[in-house]
Image (tube, rainbow, N blue to C red):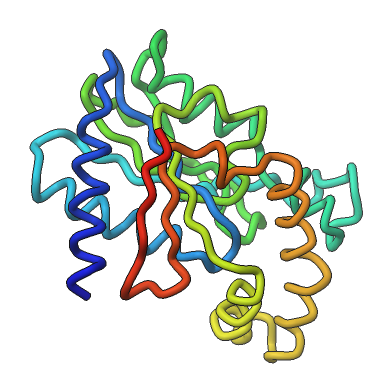
Amino acid sequence: MEQRAEMLAELAELVLAVDRPHPVRVAIDGCSAAGKTTLADELAQVLRDRTEREVIRAEIDYFKRAVELRTAYPVDSPEGYYLDTWDNEAIRDRLLIPLGPDGDRRYTTAIMDPSAQTALDTSLAVAADDAVLLADGAFLQRPELDAYWDLRVYVDITFDEVLRRGIVRDQAWMSSPEAAEHRYRTKYIPGERLYVDQIQPQTRAQLVLNNQDPANPKLTVRA
């Protein structure tokens, strides 16, 4: 894992080099099972080892829209997954804007449990002016959110690998490998293809991490 450790060290230095008069808001974007959460957790630990600055972790899956409110598209459709699953207004107004240039630094990192069945009554936290936010999730470079990130990291794997990892990871809660494969082929991957085709996140992010082989990741600095 030496190459991964070197990548994390380089990535940490790039994050710490971003200079803002407010908390630095880092998007860790990518498709399902790309390794976004693992990367964000690892990077958070490296940053905490290297700096005394506050490191805030947010998983955007805790900002899903309640299932009963997803009425614009069929819930199991690619469009429903891509366009109607996450509460982008809450992500913006309750997490990103408070940490931005004119924000009051009072933020929350969760409004719903990841199954989107139960609203969470989370208290507000107050961030230090030089804090670093690491937020991982899907579709983070959508137009509703893109202007509010200070650094964008896109975790890139092939859709074949999304399918393979997704079946391995999600078969337990989806009841069987076949059920997981069906969900990925009919909902998740088509929805993520819409995002990749429309937004082209891998060309817009400042940093692109090829995570096809997690032990030997390749980091590309685009800007």
**Residue 4 vertical placement versus 11 (above, below):** below
Q: Nearer the viewer, residue 201 or 82?
A: 201
Left or right, residue 87 beside residue 129: right
Indicate the position of residue 137 as horizontal and vertical percent values. Answer: 53, 50
Q: Look at 9% across and 50% down and name the residue there.
A: 49
Q: Look at 79% across and 65% down and name the residue there.
A: 187
**Residue 30 vertical placement versus 110 (above, below):** below
Q: Look at 69% across and 50% down and name the residue there.
A: 196
Where does the N terminus fall, quadrant-wise? bottom left
Indicate the position of residue 115 as horizontal and vertical percent values. Answer: 63, 61
**Residue 206 vertical placement versus 82 (above, below):** above
Q: Look at 40% across and 32% down and name the residue there.
A: 223
User: Most extreme residue toward the top, as rendered?
Assistant: 102
Residue 173, image quadrant: bottom right
Residue 83, image quadrant: top right
Indicate the position of residue 23 as horizontal and vertical percent values. Answer: 30, 24
Indicate the position of residue 143 as horizontal and vertical percent values. Answer: 67, 29
